[in-house]
Amino acid sequence: MIIQDGLRRMYKEQEDVFYYITLMNENYEHPALPGGAEQGILKGMYLLREGDAAAKRRVQLLGSGTILREVIAGANLLAQDYGISADIWSCPSFTEARREAMDIERWNMLHPEETAKVPWVTQCLGGRPGPVIASTDYIKMYADQIRAWVPGRYRVLGTDGFGRSDYRSKLRSFFEVDRHFVALAALQSLAAEGAVSPTTCADAIKRYQIDPERGNPARS
């Protein structure tokens, strides 16, 4: 879909732009495309799976690239182990989402008497309950670049630190971006809002065999 849009803009519309696609060297089955997601894909963010609207405790989980599967697995852990529902958002490009938000911010500044436009990120997350947690294979700054337009509490997981060679599952655990840390970050954010107790977070650390005393991967 992104390639098709790039061809349209570059060749049909003759826009002076360029497109690139990042490919990972990991084979996996990609989730099916939800209906009506076309606009969100091109804007950098779309709803992949909606949680239980009737749930008392909910979170918004954002994932990008291969880590999206860990975000999905983290949502399943939250539901199975703690009865917490999650809306799952696929984010093909946090950068594109930021560009759109900055364009809108500039337009609003230059048109003070017009009805203010709302960035896509805010449109997606506005009115949805619970804190927002993002996890990617990139440094935290990548997903953090949309923070200004995320309503509510926002927590970012990323692979800050030195490069390493090991099994992917071990690397994702080491850099604290896997399903267990997605679930723990969600619980901690809920605890900060008073929706769960700190004891619940402590239980998750024990349940998922996380060592709370290990060094910060960004400095290891």
Image (cartoon, rainbow, N blue to C red):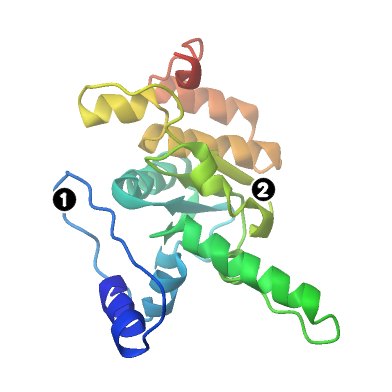
* Residue 122 visible from this viewpoint: no
Q: Position of residue 41 (x, y in %)?
A: 39, 70
- In the image, taking residue 197 as reference, residue 185 lies left or right, namely left
The residue wearing badge 1 is: 28
Q: Look at label 2 and name its amino acid.
A: Arg
Look at the image and tell me in which quarter the N terminus lies.
bottom left
* Of residues 110 and 48, the one drawn nearer to the viewer in this rendering: 110
- Residue, far left: 27
Name the residue nearer the viewer: 31 or 188: 31
Q: Position of residue 120 (x, y in %)?
A: 57, 71
Q: Nearer the viewer, residue 192 or 119?
A: 119
Three-letter residue code for mark 1? Tyr
Instruction: Classify residue 153 as left or right of residue 124.
Output: right
Which is nearer the eye, 86 or 106?
Answer: 106
The residue under the point 44% across, 24% down is 161
User: Is residue 129 positioned above or below 113 on the image?
Assistant: above
Residue 42: which disc? none
- Looking at this view, name the residue that lies furthest to the right: 113
Could you tell me residue 63's position as x and y percent? Answer: 41, 51
Residue 95 appears in the picture as rendered: yes
- Residue 49 shown left or right of residue 118 in the figure: left
Numbered disc 1: secondary structure: loop
